[in-house]
Image (spheres, helix red, strand yellow):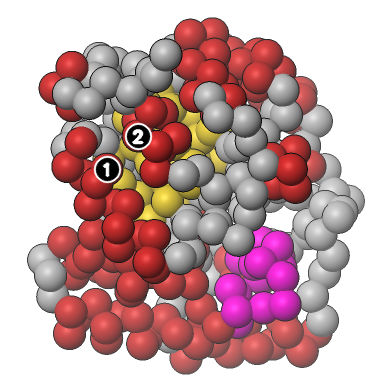
Amino acid sequence: MSLYDPAPNKRPAPANVMDLRGLNPAPVTVFDTEGKVDWAANAELAKWLAGKEGVKSLVILGHAGEGTFLTTEEQVRLIEVYVEALDGKIPVIAGITGEGTEVAAKEAKRAADAGAIGALVYPSHGWLRFGYQDGAPQDRYKAIYEESGLQCILFQYPDATKATYNLKTQLEIAAQPGVVATKNGVRNMKRWDTEIPVLRKEFPDLQILTCHDEYLLHTMFDVDGALVGYGNIAPELLFQLIQAGKAKDYAKARAIHDQLLPVTKNVYHRGSHMEGTVALKIALRARGVLKNATVRSPLIDLSAQAEQEIEAAMKEAGIV
């Protein structure tokens, strides 16, 4: 039996739904020069980002935050550090990445116990290679919400992967209790242009967030906000871009896009998208927010030339 109820006004919703209609940065995780988590520096980063206009939540333990490179104990402690640092100002959302459904549900319960409010639910990563069985993603979200009570964000992976959800699956997940938003990174404009309007029509209260760090201009006019690693380094300009998109002011949005383009190229137009995490730390160091740009394996440092190019791009964009 399908979980999808086509009547949008019947979709159960948790009380006090998170308001994500703005900028939702995915912060990096700060390490000291020896590679240990720097708890004090992470607290300072949390406060710095939360103090920026338009920031609605902070989403930790994802790819930008090297969440899967942390131990279970470090993951829980990082949530606690963020919750304490933010002191209820905005929600803490945890990336839930466990492979198995029960494993992910227990991970979500630990996150809730540590003070998280929301869950960015990653697909089971075996699906990236092999694809998913019909109904399996829906079961994953159901188990996570029932176990933890965390408000869930539907994470739509790129079309180039086998973990991308077809429209039927997206609709059935969106119909489930506890699902309050979708982070869409399909990176296929044909699918974006045809699927986003259907999600809007069927579920008007579902908050739609772009995560197309490298294609923000192209998606900004259709969304309620953005959930992006890019929010680490340019929260001020990204909030202005979101506002321009909501106002349907293309000229202003284009101007901000063009201003950011040197940074976009040097952070996200790299050989591997994973290099973007390293570049984010270099850019934050250039802003004086971080003291170092230490990353954990399997990430590796960028070249000295790349670091210089990233720093120069931040200056060209007027961010530093």
Residue 312, relative to residue 14: is it above or below?
below
The image position of residue 284, as x and y in percent, is: 58, 66
The image position of residue 12, as x and y in percent, is: 26, 15
Q: CA distance from mark 1 to mark 2?
A: 7 Å
Element at badge 2? helix
Which residue position holds label 2?
171
Residue 134, relative to residue 266: is it above or below?
above
Please state if 89 lies on the left or on the right of 161 as rendered.
left
The image position of residue 89, as x and y in percent, is: 33, 32
Does 269 lie within the magenta span? yes
| Most foreground residue, 216 or 137 | 137
* Residue shown at the point (53%, 24%) measured from the top left: 135
* Residue shown at the point (39%, 43%) measured from the top left: 167
- The span picked out in magenta is 266-280
Instruction: Tell me, yes or no, whether the two marked residues, 1 and 2, touch with CB atoms within 8 Å.
Output: yes
Does 186 lie within the magenta span? no
Element at badge 1? helix
- Residue reaching furthest top? 147
Residue 114, relative to residue 134: is it above or below?
above
Which residue position holds label 1?
199
* Residue shown at the point (24%, 46%) measured from the top left: 198
Q: Amino acid at mark 1?
A: Leu
Q: Main secondary structure of the magenta part?
A: helix
Q: Earlier in the sequence, mark 1 or mark 2?
A: 2
